[in-house]
Image: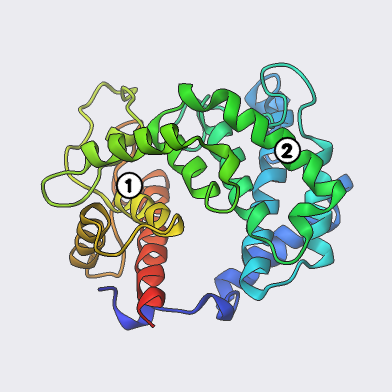
Amino acid sequence: MARPELRRDLTESATTPAEQVMLASVEKRVGDWAEMAPFYSDEKYGKGKAAESRATEAVLNAVILASYDSARSEVRPITRKAFEELWALQEAEGPLAGAWKWQDFHLGPWESTESGYQGAALLMVEGVNLSGRFAREAGTREHLDRLRDFLRKNYAAQPVVNQLYVLWASAKEPALLTKAERKALMEAVRSLQQADGGFRTAALDARERVDHTAQPTASDGYATGLVALVLEAVGTPRKDPMLSRSLTWLAAHQQSDGTWKAASLNKQRDPASDPALFMTDAATAYAVMALEAERWSRE
């Protein structure tokens, strides 16, 4: 099981200096949205990158603020503003109708052609988790309905990692998946569990690395943490072998520095480099969330 210092209740969120800095930055950008330049410009990164950057940031701003607000059972004005900015950028027609442009540098799992679907599904997770009547309000529901239609229409073509996010969202938005789709996904995920009880990211999101090196074959914290967290979210019994073995793997594979590891999908990287640490951060976050959810279920 995770060390005690990693078991921090979400109601104490934003108490660390790093979180306070991050949230202050997000809230400032949301509050001054009209004056904020996108992180990536067309001039430096190529045609269309500014629009991709703007829409991607709008989704992530809403996801971040909604996540914090749902832990406090409130919807703050700044979070509502983030959703207003988000809805203004939701695509009305074409293949992305109901979703958003997304930052695409051909890098998985977050900056690829498929990543916009994952971002849209994660937004659905947080949008329907907000407290009170927010998801049922007219100004919200019509946009969530369009988002649901996009997720349904494009579900079958997604890698397993993206389908897992839809399963997660379906805990509060059941119409996202049919019973047959849910059963098929559970069977597919179960078939990918490794002998040691863990999962590996490259099995959930199969792609060839740009440097043509082999994808790691070992289980990792990102894939295992994500699977466990999603299974918990949809009410999988703790005694279910797929869930229990995943949690056992997570409890046994925390590193001495408190992290869990996962390798880049895109190339062999220096473990100390920023791109490699993105995967470590994600693996650690999902591992902690899954273990915390398991602890809460026992208390």
| 135 is higher (above) or lower (below) than 191 | below
Local crowd size for mark 1, using a 10 Å CA cut-off: few (<14), some (14–19), many (≥20): many
Which of the pair 180/2 is nearer the observer?
Answer: 180
Q: What amino acid is found at the position of numbered circle 2 in the picture?
A: Asp
Q: Can residue 131 be seen in this view?
A: yes
Give the quadrant of the N terminus.
bottom left
Residue 198, horizontal then vertical, whole percent: 21, 50
Left or right for 182, reference 71: left
| 58 is higher (above) or lower (below) than 26 | above
Residue 271, horizontal then vertical, whole percent: 29, 48
Badge number at residue 223: 1
Q: Which residue is drawn at 68% across and 29% down?
A: 101
Whether tag 1 and tag 2 are in contact, CB under 8 A, the answer is no
Report the coloring of the rendering: rainbow
Which of the pair 111/82 is nearer the observer?
Answer: 82
Badge number at residue 145: 2
Find the distance from the CA under tag 1 to the CA under tag 2. 29 Å
Indicate the secondary structure of the residue bearing disc 2: helix
Local crowd size for mark 2, using a 10 Å CA cut-off: few (<14), some (14–19), many (≥20): some
